[in-house]
Image (cartoon, rainbow, N blue to C red):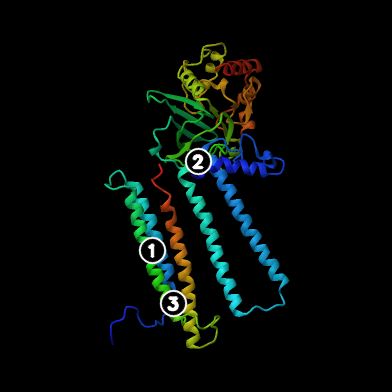
């Protein structure tokens, strides 16, 4: 079997939480990173630009991961060929339902990551 | 950039309001009648959010009316999918615009020291149920102590350090800026820039005990020259500090809790009374500053302000109370 960048279709409920989990980690990173910098900025050798840059990099990584998770979900959903609600008691229906749900959660997480990072564009310094 | 347009937008909003409908919102304690830079930004935020909220409300109600009128017509799956998709996209777009708008105002509400040193630094400490106010003079040489009144120069940035001696209080001058909590054991900060002279009212905005609703102060925005003269005068004792009435004040123990500079009264428990006669109000913003009000407060502080630490002096003869009140009113 050849090397695959994307794994085969996954049959586990955990994929559902990929997007929200990335969102949560990104959220924690942004707040903890900024809070530590503002509390210890007198002892640190770098400025707020570095903090904002760090959040920017973390945001790009988070968005790429969420988008990748979304792509996998889209594939699991059959690239949108089948219409919801996928409510039949069959394995196929369950798989499609999970793919569709994961896709929606990925979209939500994508927006959430952007909203979490948005203040970084405007806040230029710690207060006070 | 937003701040530059704030005045223009406010003007348009005032013009559009039916026959100055917003005039009912004017007054000394109104966030809708801004007299400071920060309050102006918040007013702009309020107008922006109202406009955004109105657009969302009208859109939702329109969709509701559409749904009710077309209840018998069945849409195809394709149309339904498009409705859901574009409904979601529109919602996210509106939220993004409103969020970005509010965040863009943030730097104006929390200006950092980069804008230059503030003209004056004031430390306000909240007590049950009054405010201790200390001005650090620009030369850093002296601290002027006052109470229940904050004076600031128009057009100059003032930096406030907020503290609390007992409960959580909240410092709020709606006409000048947003509110900031005063937390025991911590220092919080607020920055103010008054844009027009006037007398404004600031209430305590966090429940702090029985007389929380009776805990307020005056904020007086003065022309810079007048403010400088006022602050210089406050560094000296009142010219009438030794006038008749001081003896009654001291012999009844008032000096155990209150300070009057230039006299033996050096108490720290209650508000500093060195220039109490010149303040706008008595009892932390609840009574007009008249001899009668002062006399009434001496006689029955527990009635005027339940839970206050000051004991009542009902047992004193009315003439003696009147003499003390006359003396305190004279401390200009």
Give percent across and percent down for residue B150. Answer: 52, 30
Residue sitting at x 44%, y 41%: B111
Whether B252 is drawn above or below B270: the answer is above
- Pick whichever, B34 or B270, lies toward us: B34
Q: How many numbered circles are shown?
A: 3
Label 2 or label 3, whichever lies nearer to me, is 3
Dot 1: within a 10 Å radius of its alpha carbon, few (fewer than 14), some, or many (20 or more) residues? few
- Per the model, the C-alpha gap separating discs 1 and 2 is 36 Å
Protein chain holding label 2: B
Same chain for mark 1 and mark 3? The answer is yes
Label 1 or label 2, whichever lies nearer to me, is 1
Looking at the image, which residue sits at the far left?
Answer: A45
Considering only order in the chain, which callout, 3 or 1, is on the residue closer to the N terminus? 1
Dot 2: within a 10 Å radius of its alpha carbon, few (fewer than 14), some, or many (20 or more) residues? some
Dot 3 corresponds to which residue?
A73
Same chain for mark 2 and mark 3? The answer is no
Dot 2 corresponds to which residue?
B167
Residue sitting at x 51%, y 45%: B2
Whether A51 is drawn above or below B163: the answer is below
- Per the model, the C-alpha gap separating discs 2 and 3 is 52 Å
Residue sitting at x 58%, y 67%: B87
Protein chain holding label 1: A
Q: Quadrant of residue B245?
A: top right
**Residue A120 relative to residue B324: left or right:** left
Give percent across and percent down for residue B25. Answer: 66, 40
- Name the mark on residue A35: none
Dot 3: within a 10 Å radius of its alpha carbon, few (fewer than 14), some, or many (20 or more) residues? many
Dot 1 corresponds to which residue?
A25
Whether B107 is drawn above or below B90: the answer is above
């Amino acid at each position: 079997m050849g090397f695959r960048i994307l794994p085969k279709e996954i049959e586990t409920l955990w994929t559902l939480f990929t997007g929200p989990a990335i969102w949560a980690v990104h959220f924690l990173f942004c707040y903890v990173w900024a809070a530590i910098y503002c509390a210890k900025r007198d002892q640190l050798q770098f400025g707020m630009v570095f903090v904002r840059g760090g959040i920017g990099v973390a945001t790009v990584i988070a968005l790429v991961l969420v988008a990748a998770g979304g792509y996998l979900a889209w594939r699991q959903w059959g690239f949108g060929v089948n219409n919801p609600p996928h409510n039949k008691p069959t394995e196929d229906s369950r798989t499609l339902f999970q793919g569709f749900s994961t896709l929606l959660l990925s979209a939500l997480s994508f927006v959430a990551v952007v909203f979490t990072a948005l203040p970084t564009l405007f806040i230029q310094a710690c207060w006070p | 950039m937003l701040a530059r347009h704030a005045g223009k937008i406010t003007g348009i909003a005032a013009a559009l309001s039916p026959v100055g409908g917003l005039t009912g919102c004017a007054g000394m304690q109104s966030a809708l009648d801004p007299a400071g830079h920060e309050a102006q930004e918040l007013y702009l935020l309020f107008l922006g959010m109202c406009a955004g909220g109105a657009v969302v409300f009208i859109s939702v109600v329109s969709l509701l009316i559409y749904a009710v009128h077309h209840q018998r017509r069945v849409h195809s799956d394709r149309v339904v999918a498009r409705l859901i998709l574009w409904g979601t996209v529109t919602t996210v777009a509106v939220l993004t615009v409103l969020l970005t708008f509010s965040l863009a105002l943030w730097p104006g509400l929390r200006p950092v020291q980069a804008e230059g040193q503030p003209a004056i630094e004031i430390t306000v400490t909240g007590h049950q149920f009054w405010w201790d106010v200390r001005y650090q003079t620009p030369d850093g040489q002296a601290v002027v102590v006052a109470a229940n009144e904050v004076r600031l120069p128009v057009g100059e940035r003032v930096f406030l350090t907020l503290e609390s001696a007992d409960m959580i209080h909240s410092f709020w001058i709606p006409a000048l800026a947003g509110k900031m909590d005063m937390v025991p054991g911590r220092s919080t900060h607020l920055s103010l820039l008054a844009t027009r002279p006037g007398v404004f009212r600031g209430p305590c905005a966090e429940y702090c005990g029985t007389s929380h609703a009776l805990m307020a102060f005056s904020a007086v925005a003065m022309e810079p020259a007048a403010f400088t003269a006022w602050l210089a005068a406050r560094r000296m004792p009142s010219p009438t500090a030794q006038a008749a009435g001081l003896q009654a004040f001291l012999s009844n123990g008032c000096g155990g809790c209150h300070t009057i500079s230039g006299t033996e009264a050096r108490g720290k428990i209650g508000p500093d009374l060195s220039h109490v006669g010149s303040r706008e109000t008595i009892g932390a913003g609840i009574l007009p500053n008249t001899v009668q009000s002062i006399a009434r407060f001496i006689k029955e502080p527990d009635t005027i302000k339940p839970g206050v630490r000051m004991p009542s002096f009902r047992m004193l003869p009315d003439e003696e109370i009147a003499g003390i009140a006359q003396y305190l009113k004279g401390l200009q």
